[in-house]
Amino acid sequence: IRKLTRQKREDINSYLNANFDDYEQFLLFVINAYETGNSDHKGNMTNIITDHKILCVGLVSGLTNLRASYPDYEPIKATCTKYIDKFNLFRGKSNNLTLPFNN
C-alpha cells in the first residue's frame, strides 16, 4: 500500500528535503525581517514568529517520531536530525527576540 501511495521511505525523505529546505529559508527570512525592521514592522511580525515557533514544536515532535520509525534507514534519520536541529535553532533564536505584545 505504501508503494501505491508514494509513501516509500525514499519518497518521504525526498519530500522532507524539498519542502523543509523551503520552510527553513522562510524561517530565516522571518527572523531577518524582524531583526532589521522598525517597531511597527516588528509588531506586525510578532504573531508570525509566535505561530511558527508553535509549528516548529510540532514539527520537531513529528520528526523525532519519524526518525524512530525508520531506525534502519540512515537517510531519513539524517534528514530528520538535520531539520530537528534547524527548527530548534529557529525556536532558540526566536526565544531571544524581544517580541512586543499586539493589542
Image (tube, grey):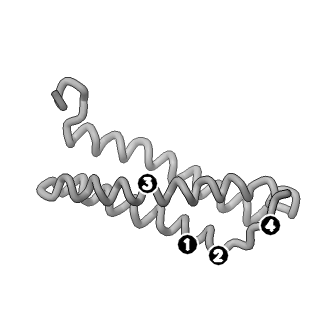
Gap in Å between the C-alphas at discs 2 and 1?
Answer: 6 Å
Which residue is the extreme one toward the left? 72
Gap in Å between the C-alphas at discs 2 and 4?
Answer: 13 Å
Does residue 15 appear left or right of residue 27 in this picture?
left
Q: Which residue is mark 4?
A: 100
For mark 3, give the secondary structure.
helix
Q: Which residue is mark 2?
A: 96
Residue 75 at what x, y percent from top left?
22, 53
Q: Which residue is mark 1?
A: 92
The three-letter amino acid code for the residue at tag 4 is Pro
Q: Nearer the viewer, mark 1 or mark 3?
A: 3
The three-letter amino acid code for the residue at tag 3 is Leu
Does residue 19 sit above or below 51 in this rendering?
A: above
Which quadrant would the N terminus be assigned to in this image?
A: top left
Residue 94 at what x, y percent from top left?
62, 68
What residue appears at the point 47 percent right and 67 percent down from the top-left corner? 88
- Asked whether disc 2 touches disc 1, contact meaning CB atoms under 8 Å apart, the reply is yes
The three-letter amino acid code for the residue at tag 1 is Gly
Q: Which residue is mark 3?
A: 59
The three-letter amino acid code for the residue at tag 2 is Asn
Does residue 103 sit above or below 23 in this rendering?
A: below
What residue appears at the point 58 percent right and 50 percent down from the top-left corner? 26
Residue 2 at what x, y percent from top left?
18, 31
